[in-house]
Amino acid sequence: MATLEIKDLHVAVTTEDGQKPILNGVDLTIRSGQTHAIMGPNGSGKSTLAYSIAGHPKYTVTSGSVTLDGVDVLSMKVDERARAGLFLAMQYPVEVPGVSVSNFLRTAKTALSGEAPKLRTWAKDVNSALDSVKMDRDFAQRNVNEGFSGGEKKRHEIVQLELLNPQLAILDETDSGLDIDALKIVAEGVNRFRDQGDRAVLLITHYTRILRYITPDFVHVFVAGRIAEQGGPELAERLEAEGYDRYLQGAAS
Amino acid sequence: MTPAPNVAAAAEAVESHLHPVPSYDVAVHPKPSGLEEVWRFTPLKRLRGLLDGEPSGDRLKWEAEVPPQVTVSEISAADARELGEMRPTDRPAALAVVNADRVVLVDVPAGAVLDSPLVIRLTGASVDETAWAHVLLRIGDHADGTVVFEHTGSARYAATTSVLVGAGANVELVSLQLWDDDAVHLGQINTRIGRDAVVRSFQVSLGGDVVRIVENVEYDAPGGQLEMYGVYFVDAGQHIEHRLFVDHNQPHTASHAVYKGGLQGEGAHSVWVGDVLIRKVAEGIETFETNRNLVLTDGCRADSVPNLEIETGEIRGAGHASATGRFDDEQLFYLQSRGISEDEARRLVVHGFFADIVRRIGVGEVEERLMAALERELAGDPAAVQRAQAAGR
C-alpha cells in the first residue's frame, strides 16, 4: 500500500523575467486503490503538478512537501522517484534517437527491479504489452518515440505503464490528441493497471471524455495553481455541462 | 554551349579556397604559419616537428589479415604515379610521399568478392619515432569488399593513402584511429571513384594527441556514389580534426557525409571542415553533408565549417547541416523518469547518438569494439588527465 501526500505545494518556473509562481498551495492525498482526476483549464498548473512530482529540473519547489509513505520525495533525484514507485505518462513523450524501444524498456525494467529481467519471459511480456495496445511488435526495434505518431507515442507510454507497473501512475493529458479508438485502447490499459486493486492513478485531463472510460473516485478542479473544488465523479459531469467559466470568474474577481 | 571545352576550362580555372592545390612538389606546400585557411585550426606546436619533414627510417609495425584474392606488394613512388594515384594536397601528404622509402600496393583484383574484411593493423612503438607512409589501394572493377585500417600505439605519423576504385565496385573503407594519448597523426586519403561504383567510408578517431585526417574525393566517371561517415570522441586536451573535400567533377554522382563527435573535458577541440565543390560539368549530382557535435562538459570547443560551392544549378540537390549542442535535458529527464540513473541515461543518449553511424559499418566485431570504446571514453579514462596536463604546458 502506498500513500502520496502533497501538502501546501508551491512551485515556480524560471523564466526570462525571473521566477514565475505556478502552483499556489496544492493539498492532495492519493492512496493505493484510488483514482483521482485533476481537471482544469489550460494554464491552471495541472501539468506543472505532474512534472513537479516527477522532478523535472525546470520547476522549483518554493515551499510545501511531497511524501510517499512518509518519505520525502522532493529530495529524491528523478530516477530515485521512479524507483520509489512513481511513474509519469507524459503529454509529449520525448524522442531518443539511436535507442531502441526494446533496449529502453529492458534498461528501465532492470533499473527499477534491480536485476535484468529473464530473457525469455521478458520478450513475451514486451510483445504482449505491445499487443494489448494494438502496437505492431516491430515497434520494439524502433528508436524510442522517433517517427511515432501522436497516438503511437501515447500508447507507448501505456506499454511502459504495463511493463514497469509502478505504485502510482500520473497520466498527464494522455487522452489529448487521441481519436476515439486510441482513447479506448489507452483507457483499457489504465483500467488493467487499476484492476490490480492496490495501484493509484492520478489522471490529469482537460476534457471529461476519458472519464467515460476511466471512472475516477475523486475529481479535483484545478484553477490558478490550486484545487478550487473537489467532489466525486458527478463533479466531472457538472463540468461537462457548465465548463470552467464559473471558476475562472471566481479566480479573476 | 558545348560542354566539353567548358569542362576542361572549368577544371583548370576553379580558383577557390575550397580547392586544395595538388602537387608532389613539397615547395608548393610551404611550412605553415598557422594563419593559412587549411591550418588555422591545427595546433602546429603540438605536431612534434612533423612538418619539418626530417627523413626517418622508422615504420609502424604492419600486420595484415589478407583474404586470398588480395595481393600486397611494394612498388616505387614512380610506379604509384604511373598507376594514377591522386597527388597530395598538403604538406604532410607531400612529405610522406617524399620520405616514405616505398609504396605499399594493396590490390583487390577486378571481380573479386571478399568474404572477410582485409584488415591492416598499424602499430607505433613510441611517439619519439617518426614514420612516413605511402599506400596505394587499388579496387578492381566490380570488386566487392571491406578494408579496415587500424592505428594503435604511438608515433608521429604522416601517411598518404590513395584509393582507386574501379567501375562498378562496391567497397567499404574503415579507418580506426585508436592511438595512445601522445600520438600525432597527419593522414590524407585521396579517393577516386569509378563509374557507378559505390564507396562507403568510415573515419573513427578516438585516440591520439593531435589527429588530422584529410579526405579528398573525386570521380573518374559518372554514376559514382559516396557515403562518408565519421565518428570522433575528443577528450580533455585532445585535438581531432577531420577535413573533407568532395569534388563533384562528374555528372550524376552523389555524396552523402555524416560526421558525429562527442567532446568531453577541458581543452577538448574538434574541427570538422566539409568542402563540396560542384563543377559546371556536374549536372544531376546530389550532395548533402552533416556534422553534429555533442558537447558533454564545459571547456570544449567544436569548430564546424561546412562549405558548398556550386557552379551549376542543374543538380538534384545540395545542402549541409551543422549542429553543436549539449545533452538534451528532456531526453535525460524522460529516461530518468523511468528509473534509469543519470549516468546510465547519459550513456544511452551518447550510445544512441553514435549508434546510427557505427551500426552501418557492417563489421560486427568492429562495431562492438567501437561502441565499447565510446562507452569507455564517456566514462572518462584516467589518461585524459595527462592529456589535459600536457595541453596546459
Image (cartoon, helix red, strand yellow):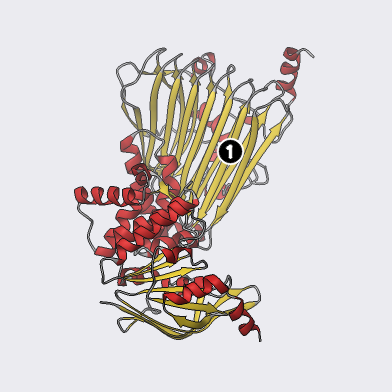
Q: Position of residue A24 (x, y in %)?
A: 53, 84
Is any part of residue B393 visible from this angle? no
The residue positioned farthest toward the right in the image shown: B1
Q: Is residue B12 above or below residue A25?
A: above
Please name the amino acid that badge 1 sits on: Glu
Left or right of residue B106, residue B166 in this image? right
Which image quarter is the N terminus of chain A in? bottom left
Q: Residue at x 57, y 41 (%)?
A: B290
Residue at image point 39% right, 32% down? B149
- Any part of residue A93 in sight: yes
What residue does disc 1 label? B289
Provide residue B274's location: percent of width, then percent of height: 60, 39
Q: Nearer the viewer, residue A51 or A223?
A: A223
Q: Quadrant of the C terminus of chain A?
A: bottom right
Residue closer to the observer: A22 or B52: A22
- Measured along the vertical axis of the image, is residue B291 above or below residue B388? above
Residue B123 appears in which quarter of the rendering? top left
Taking A116 as reference, is A214 left or right? Answer: right
Q: Quadrant of residue A203?
A: bottom left
Residue placed most toward the observer, B8 or B344: B344
The chain containing the residue under callout 1 comes to B
Q: Position of residue B254 (x, y in %)?
A: 58, 27
Secondary structure type for disc 1: strand
* Residue occupying the point 43% across, 64% down: A212
- What percent of the width, then of the height, locates residue A152? 44, 50
Give the mark count.
Answer: 1
At 38% from the left edge and 36% from the top edge, which residue is drawn?
A: B150
Q: Residues within 10 Å of mark 1 (few under 14, many from 20)?
A: many
